[in-house]
Amino acid sequence: MSYVDAGYAIALATLFVYAVTLVLRRRRWERALQMSEPAGESESAPAGSEQS
Amino acid sequence: MSAQAMTRRPRWLTVVGVLGVIAMGFTVWLGLWITPPDQFQGNLARLLYIHPAIATVALYWVGLVAAGGSLLYLWPRTRSLFWDRLAAASVEVGAVFAALTLVTGAIWGRPVWGVWWTWDARLTSTALLLLLEIGYLALRRVPAEPAIRARRCAVAALLIAIDIPIVHFSVDWWNTLHQGGTFIDPGFQIHASPSMSWTFLLGFIAFTLVFVWLLGVRYQVEVLQDAVGDQELEVSLSERWSEDTDLVGAAASAPTPGPGGGTS
């Protein structure tokens, strides 16, 4: 493998792995938030009532 | 804010992500297969389609967001946890880009300079930037009230930002192995063929789009982390409150001791 191939492979692979871990982290925290929310609160809140 | 609102994913972020992937694909295709080899560096010049673009994100975009967000948090009229979270997200993404700057630079430097690493001013100040960013992330994990943590981190981010002009001007201030502008000189004259120049520009756009997408997702993680922390605190407080209420209720309904210390 040449230096050029190695440089591209490392850069793209690192960014890809980091992006995947970020998406997984976001999913995990979304689940944690839904589980920690008091029962019935998410159902009672009308959809689109609040903007992030 | 409800969980539904917090887990909503903005459409613009998805669009930026898709555009980033497309631009990155074109950069790789043009950089590896279409552009001609350089007159002096041969195929090694192909690394320059990604290394300066990664370094630009690590240095300028991250510095702008982290220092700007921290300043806006510290300024009383614009104080909001939004700025603190944005700065924190930026520093984490910046640490990844700073590490990639050093790695891709070393891969280019080994065949061109003959060394993987040298204690050159540009390389050393970039490595220092990475270490400072790791320090910031460690500081952020120290348990504290959100406002105290935000103030502490904002000051740290501003201290890190001092290193950015040092990295930028290091090639002018010191006699370094790292060269100055390769494609564009200080007079903005481009020293490359059109296909190389367009690929170079596309690389900057691609890595900037990827940075914006990563920043957006990392910001969402920061918001969710804080929300879960708040929810858990509320649950703990309500449990404690109900325990206290039960104790007060039990004490009120307990039989009153008689004059001799016994129950009446």
Image (cartoon, grey):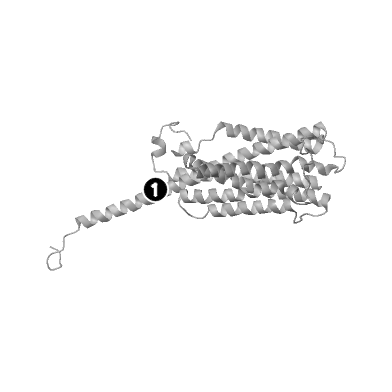
Q: Answer yes or no: is residue A4 visible.
A: yes
**Residue under the point 72% across and 37% down:** B203
- Return the residue nearer the eye: B216 or B156: B156
- Return the residue nearer the eye: B39 or B12: B39
Q: Answer yes or no: is residue B100 visible.
A: no
Left or right: where B193 falls relative to B159 = right
Q: Position of residue B123 (x, y in %)?
A: 73, 52
**Residue under the point 80% across and 48% down:** A3
Please name the residue that numbered disc 1 is placed on: B234
Q: Amino acid at mark 1?
A: Glu
Q: Position of residue B24 (x, y in %)?
A: 71, 36
**Residue under the point 41% across and 36% down:** A43
Q: Residue furthest right?
A: B39
- The image quadrant where one finds the C terminus of chain B is bottom left
- Return the residue nearer the eye: B205 or B235: B205
Q: Residue furthest front?
A: B173
- The image quadrant where one finds the N terminus of chain B is top left
Q: Position of residue B45 (x, y in %)?
A: 81, 42
Left or right: where A46 falls relative to B155 = left
